[in-house]
Image (tube, rainbow, N blue to C red):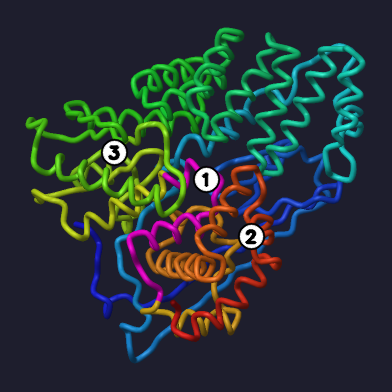
């Protein structure tokens, strides 16, 4: 049931994966993303499991990515094998990604901006942006004019700009100012809730989403957003109710997909029991609340929580949700890829079968998924390669087994670019996932070896502050992805560490 195949069975290989697209904006800045789609007067772009929008009028052009392909064979299969199980931390956005990561799509369904008399949004945007960067002095000067509606509109545009630049913390700060100046404007409150979700501040998002619905009870998008806030906060039935009400007002495939998922989850967990302690809320099927397995799992998780807190230097404050499924329930509820051995999507979702105690394999799986919950708290926008790399290191797992072959791929320029591995690995097939996880582990091992865990924590801090993955990396290694990928060839050529 847990997919851990022998080393000689799996060859490190990659078939075809898309390069990232680059959106060139007229103000001179650029957005790198997994894919882009034209939708009416906006460009929809996806980064990992999150969907964003940018007006076509702001776009100078789009550079479409190509593909890369790698196929590795060797007489010594064990030298290039990558063991399972893998964690589908962010899988298909329509199936098993965290709703917090897709809330920007819901914000995008709201009006682009409220109509405010005497406010020219295009002129205001030009006033507050200077060569693609926000002009804080311009915002200050607008606020000095003591025109609350114009000031609110300016901060709203600032929030949208920061969101488009993938700086969630800054976006929340600006939208909060917009709401302070226009507390009864539904669009501003709607975006406030959406951006709070993007920043992982779920409890606050519930409050603002409820307020958005109070201000506009007929808004299907506000009700859908409220459903996501409820879902992320653990209120499953409330989420189902909000999504149903939203669909009654306006059919929407996106909301319907998540409603179906929530209903599958509710059905599977209808008769589940629950055990709580200081750090965890454990849900499981069975009639014995104090079963040996659940007690053993909670003891294991508590020990791992303390170990990770010491190792990483931080820990989640809110209780962590853990759900145990049968294998069939796991795939029915999550719709995870077939290669997944577990999943973290805001909750630790673990398939179990015919076991009465925590085996060494289950202990690795629990620690891997628990690491994801720690990283989510530290930096919700952490790139998948670093997120999965840290989780594998903590299992613990080593890249030494496949280091020579992977090192050759980096030296030959045939490895998957780390920029492509910023998004979730759930979009890959099993062969592609093997290479993605191998690269993630090797890259993170190298960063720890070179800069220490304190260096990785500094990188997570920068990500939390809203910096892009490459900007956070460049602050650490002074060279970004190009330098890291070049150095990985040498690091792995020596067998890794």
Quadrant containing the C terminus is bottom left
Task: Please report the residue visible at 68 percent of the width from the left and 59 percent of the height from the top.
Answer: 475
Which residue does the numbered mark 3 point to in the structure image? Answer: 322
Task: Please report the residue visible at 47 percent of the width from the left and 35 percent of the height from the top.
Answer: 99
* Spot occupied by residue 389 in the image (x, y as percentages of width and height): 45, 61
176 w.r.t. 396: above or below? above
**Residue 377 shown in magenta:** yes
- Magenta span of residues: 374-399
Left or right of residue 28: residue 359: left
Distance CA(mark 2)–CA(mark 1): 21 Å
* Spot occupied by residue 278 in the image (x, y as percentages of width and height): 29, 32
Between residue 55 and residue 456, name the one nearer to us: 456
Q: Secondary structure at mark 2?
A: helix
Left or right of residue 468: residue 441: left
* Spot occupied by residue 124 in the image (x, y as percentages of width and height): 88, 27
Rendered image: mark on residue 60:
none
Which residue does the numbered mark 1 point to in the structure image? Answer: 49
First in residue order: circle 1 vs circle 3: 1
First in residue order: circle 2 vs circle 1: 1
Rendered image: mark on residue 473:
2
Task: Please report the residue visible at 48 percent of the width from the left and 23 percent of the height from the top.
Answer: 203
Task: Please report the residue visible at 33 percent of the width from the left and 45 percent of the height from the top.
Answer: 305
- The rendered magenta stretch, by its main secondary structure, is classed as helix
**Residue 407 shown in magenta:** no
Q: Secondary structure at mark 3?
A: strand
Q: Are marks 1 and 3 in contact (CB under 8 Å)?
A: no
316 w.r.t. 36: above or below? above
Q: Secondary structure at mark 1?
A: loop
């Amino acid at each position: 049931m847990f997919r851990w195949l022998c080393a000689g069975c799996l060859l490190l290989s990659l078939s075809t994966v898309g390069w990232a697209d680059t959106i060139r904006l007229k103000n001179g800045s650029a957005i790198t993303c997994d894919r882009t789609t034209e939708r009416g007067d906006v460009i929809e772009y996806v980064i990992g499991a999150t969907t964003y929008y940018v007006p076509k009028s702001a776009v100078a052009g789009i550079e479409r990515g190509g593909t890369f392909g790698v196929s590795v064979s060797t007489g010594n299969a064990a030298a290039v094998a990558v063991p399972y199980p893998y964690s589908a931390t962010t899988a298909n956005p329509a199936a098993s990604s965290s709703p917090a990561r897709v809330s920007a799509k819901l914000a995008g369904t709201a009006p682009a901006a409220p109509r405010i008399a005497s406010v020219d949004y295009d002129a205001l945007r030009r006033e507050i942006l200077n060569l693609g960067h926000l002009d804080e002095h311009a915002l200050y000067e607008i606020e000095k004019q003591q025109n609350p509606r114009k000031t609110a509109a300016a901060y709203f545009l600032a929030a949208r700009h920061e969101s488009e630049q993938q700086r969630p913390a800054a976006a929340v700060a600006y939208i909060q100012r917009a709401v302070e100046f226009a507390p009864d404007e539904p669009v501003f409150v709607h975006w406030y809730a959406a951006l709070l979700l993007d920043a992982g501040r779920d409890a606050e998002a519930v409050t603002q989403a409820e307020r958005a619905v109070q201000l506009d009870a007929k808004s299907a998008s506000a009700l859908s957003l409220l459903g996501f806030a409820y879902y992320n906060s653990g209120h499953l039935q409330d989420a189902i109710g909000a999504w149903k009400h939203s669909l009654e007002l306006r059919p929407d495939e996106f909301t319907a997909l998540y409603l179906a998922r929530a209903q599958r989850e509710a059905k599977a967990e209808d008769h589940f029991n629950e055990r709580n302690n200081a750090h965890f809320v454990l849900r499981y099927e069975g009639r014995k609340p104090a079963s040996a397995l659940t007690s053993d799992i909670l003891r294991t998780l508590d020990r791992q929580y303390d170990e990770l807190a010491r190792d990483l230097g931080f820990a989640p404050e809110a209780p962590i949700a853990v759900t145990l499924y049968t294998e069939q329930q796991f795939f029915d509820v999550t719709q995870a890829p077939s290669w997944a051995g577990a999943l973290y999507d805001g909750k630790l979702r673990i398939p179990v079968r015919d076991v009465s105690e925590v085996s060494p394999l289950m202990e690795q799986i629990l620690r891997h998924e628990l690491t994801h919950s720690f990283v989510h708290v530290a930096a919700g926008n952490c790139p998948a390669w670093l997120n999965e790399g840290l989780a594998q290191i903590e299992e613990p797992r080593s890249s030494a087994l496949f280091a020579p072959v992977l090192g050759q791929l980096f030296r030959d320029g045939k490895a998957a670019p780390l920029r492509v591995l910023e998004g979730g690995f759930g979009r890959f097939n099993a062969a592609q996932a093997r290479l993605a996880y191998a690269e993630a582990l090797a890259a993170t091992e190298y960063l720890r070896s070179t800069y220490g865990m304190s260096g990785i924590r500094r990188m997570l801090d920068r990500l939390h502050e809203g910096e892009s993955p490459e900007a956070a990396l460049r602050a650490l290694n002074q060279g970004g992805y190009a330098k890291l990928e070049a150095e990985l060839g040498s690091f792995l050529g020596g067998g890794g560490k």
